[in-house]
Image: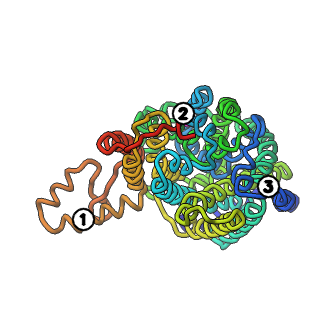
Amino acid sequence: MGSLDQAAKEVLQQTNFTAIDWVIVICYPMISVVIGLVVRKYIANMKDFVTAGQGLGTCLGIATLTGTELGLITVMYSAEKGFKCGFSSFHIAMVAGIITFIVGVTGFMIYRLRSMGVLTIPGFYRRRFGRKTQILGGIMMAAAGILNMGLFLKVGAMFLVGITGMDPESDALEMVMGFLIALVLLYTCLGGMVSVVLSDYLQFVVLSIGMVLTTIMAVIKLGWGNIFDTVFEFKGASGFNPVVAPVDGGDGFGWEYIIWMCFMGLVGCAIWPTSVARALAADSPKTVKKQFTWASLSYTIRFLVPYFWGICAFVFIYTQNDTLKSLFVAEDGGEPVMSSLYAMPVFMGQMLPPVVIGIITAGMIAAFMSTHDSYLLCWSSVLTEDIVSPLCNDRISPTVRIWLTRFFIVLIGVYVFWWGLFYEGSEDVWDYMAVTGGIYASGAFALMACGLYWKRASSTGAIFALLTGSTAVVGLSPVKTGIGWWLTNLGSLSEGLWNFFTYLPGVTYLSQYPGVLQVEISPARVSLFSFASTFIVMIVVSLLFPDRDPQSAQESK
């Protein structure tokens, strides 16, 4: 972010956030802490702590599933896509809803997983492929998952800084990050999945009402016609159609990106551990199918509404305030002064009236907490149940398991704080999450699909597939930059090697550094390659190195 002058700081401070709103924001999250204290007495073993005793019904399951997946990070990265790409970003929401509906109706993967009664996905790996696969799968899942949530805290804090009118160049961001992570760690460690489920339900109710109210007020403020006309004026047809190339080199999608989103839609509902955790916590396999079928609607809405908020922020900034526009619009091909992540919270801070803005902000903070507690609990339980415990031959007592899980929760929280401060990448937050999630999901998709539906899937194939899935990390911009510098240094050894590198697909010269190579393969292409290669490796290696006593998932129950 560039330096802000006094005029810019003054326009950012023109928020409607008042003292009464601060009272609402501070008091509301304390309800979650009280829930954690109350339900602590119901935590007797690891099954209660991780899956709430596997007793979730359909309605509560839908609410907690939506509450987890509709986190503040979801709102922020969706609003960023809406701000940059307009209505064409809606295709991501539609794909997510359709895929989730299909999974719910068919029960693809999630039905059989719940039927097996496992606590975690690596637990399925162990039952189907053995202890070594469980340990490697747990390591891959935890590493990718913890990396995936690395920006959650910073992005959530950016929302609070933007909507309240704090100075983004001060220490406010770091202070907000510290307060939020401390609050989340406290009640997640206390109550486990029970407190998560109850808090998710409360957040689901509050946030649902708040989202409807905010959307109506945004339309009244800007006007339907003005919203559509402004998007078309500045973005052209690409602001509505995801396959149309953007004007003036702006942000767009294309068929390759859409296909990638189809895979990510499947990952989000049937493979991603925090979603699967809700399936594993359901009271029966039939409930799982109902839960995901009905949740498909909420999966669509959780994207659509934040996308629309981002579009409204775009219209507001481009048409109603020239000073704000100068902050968010890049000049002469450079970087804008303000990150586009600030656009939506700044717009809401200047559009919503007092009290309403406090309730919305409180709901967003609750959403932030809901997502964090679920992710912290998921990755910490994987570290305990699927890595440490198997390495100790499952000789850890239930009490030690719970305390070890709580230790990992705190450790991950410290990492999230550190990573949010120091990571710098050029990709959008959603693309960052999709790429890091693909490090786990590529291998998990191959293991779960083949392990559940193909009797000849072997443990050797599973090991190689998990390792192959790690190639998805190449989609991150810092990794691609590092590869470019490595190719530059290696190519300097000979002219023939240099010429070979320059003919590779996606390898070009860095414009700001003549003679330096840059890798420009899109995250979508890297992820699709990772998915395809991992699945092929799983099948080929399983055929070449079959297990002596192959066992299907149905037989292993």
Give the mark nearest the N terminus, 3 or 2: 3
Magenta region's main secondary structure? helix
Secondary structure beneath label 3:
loop
* Foreground disc of the pair 1, 3: 1
Q: Residue at x 65, y 67 (%)?
A: 404
**Residue kind at label 2, given as amino acid type:** His
Q: Is residue 489 above or below residue 138?
A: below
The residue indicated by pointer 1 is: 488
The residue indicated by pointer 2 is: 91
**Residue kind at label 1, given as amino acid type:** Thr
Q: Position of residue 136 (x, y in %)?
A: 46, 57
The residue indicated by pointer 3 is: 16
Q: Are marks 3 and 2 in contact (CB under 8 Å)?
A: no
Q: Residue at x 66, y 29 (%)?
A: 293
Q: Quadrant of the C terminus?
A: top right
Answer left or right for 324 relative to 427. right
Secondary structure beneath label 1:
helix
- Magenta region: which residues? 91-95
Mark 1 is surrounded, within 10 Å at the Cα level, by few (under 14), some (14 to 19) or many (20 or more) other residues, namely many
Give the mark nearest the N terminus, 2 or 1: 2
Q: How many marks?
A: 3
Q: Position of residue 352 (x, y in %)?
A: 78, 48
In the image shown, does 267 or 111 lie closer to the viewer?
A: 111
Q: Is residue 468 above or below residue 105?
A: below
Q: Residue furthest bottom?
A: 171
Residue 472 magenta-drawn?
no
